[in-house]
Image (tube, helix red, strand yellow):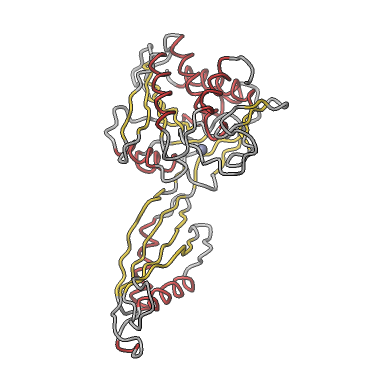
Amino acid sequence: MVEQKPLYRLLERLVDIPSESGDETALGDFLFEWMKENALSPERQKTRDGRFNVLGRLTGSLRSESPKCLLLAGHMDTVSAGKDWERDPFCLEMTDEGFASGLGVADMKGGIACILWIAKKLMDDACPFAGTVELAFFVDEERYSIGAHDYVLSPVKHCPDFAILAEPHFHEIIVGAPGKVLLELVCEGKTGHASRPSEGINAIEIASEMMHFLNRDMAAAGDGDRGSYSALNIITNIDNYSLSIPDYCKVILNKQLVPGEKLEDFLKNIEEVFEQKVGRGSLSIKRGLPEYPGHKVEENNPFLKSLVREIADFGLPAPTLRNNDGVSDANILQSFLGIPTVLFGPKGSRYHTRDERIDLGSMDMYIDILDSYIRNVLK
Ligand SMILES: [Zn+2]
């Protein structure tokens, strides 16, 4: 049991409900009920696989000529605890340096607790802003972002002008990220007796030639303008020993995308290499999940500038604005709906490890900063 402060008790409750990716229902039900009790207009938004995101809304009580919409969002799922944890990962434990530890406490149940608390504060104060604050809690961020994908595919009531995902970045604001796409490159050849290879087209050989020429012509490690790529697996249609020339070979390829890089350009390069250098058999390319295009928020975005100013007004050091190494739901929100999206939340550390923890003091500060930000930016 942590301190009796209501915010920390809420966090304790969130950690107490397991919500590994794929199994977020119990946490979704809890959030729905909590939001209902606090008049935050919750709804369950079904996803393609029968799970649901939880959405909510606050409507400001002030008038404005051009009301704006701000989205505060996060993901309900956590990674799995695995065998790493030496104690109960679902029991929030206070550590002596003002941190609390538990599975998902930083990534990102601390952020969810803060969003709920900010919404409650605004509601208790009769929503002293103009426009709308939307709330969204997604499933599946730690895997394929199915929650965020289905959110952007659904008809949008008020497309937010700006979004903040309360991921555990406190002294920095993440304004961009590379993307990544899983590709299936299917090479088809011509079968025949393997003792007479010249009579067929060996699909394994044309696939390996394609990869060889691709690596020769393009830097696999990427450069400033291009992200890296890497073959992860190859699959053929031959299971057992057989003296047949394989006529099918699929290369599973992970492609990283730097912000601004177009996947179509990379696909065109592969097709050209295949046509000009391999020159036999056929190639087809399929895009699969995960698919996260890169994203980047402009530094002069007015919502971002106001956020930086708000943080400074609290006497904190100016946050660093930087691009993330990995992907998040921000890639989906910004690329598919055009919502400038940043990651900014209470301070967490060691997430995805057994020492995952959150700085409790940063939760209080975060709530005060965003509460004031919303009142100032939505006018
Ligand atoms: Zn996260």
Q: Image check: 222 left or right of 333?
A: right
The quadrant in which residue 353 appears is top right
Vertical position of residue 191 compared to residue 317: above or below:
below
Above or below: residue 197 compared with residue 153: below
Residue 228 vertical placement versus 323 (above, below)? below
Determine the residue located farthest toward the top in the rendered image.
Answer: 125
Query: Residue 179 in the image: x percent, y percent?
Result: 45, 50
- In the picture, measured across the screen, residue 287 lies left or right of residue 143, that is left
- Quarter the N terminus occupies: top right
Q: Can you give x and y, in whole percent of width and height, for residue 167 in the image?
A: 53, 34
**Residue furthest right in the image:** 96
Q: Using the rendered view, name the quadrant where residue 311 is placed.
A: top right
Q: Nearer the viewer, residue 235 or 181?
A: 235
Q: How many marks?
A: 0
Tell me where residue 293 appears, x and y as whole percent.
41, 49
- Residue 378 location (% of width, % of height): 43, 20
**Residue 83 or residue 258, whichever sits in front:** 83
Q: Quadrant of the C terminus?
A: top left
Task: Using the image as rendered, state which of residue 237 and residue 229 is in the foreground.
Answer: 237
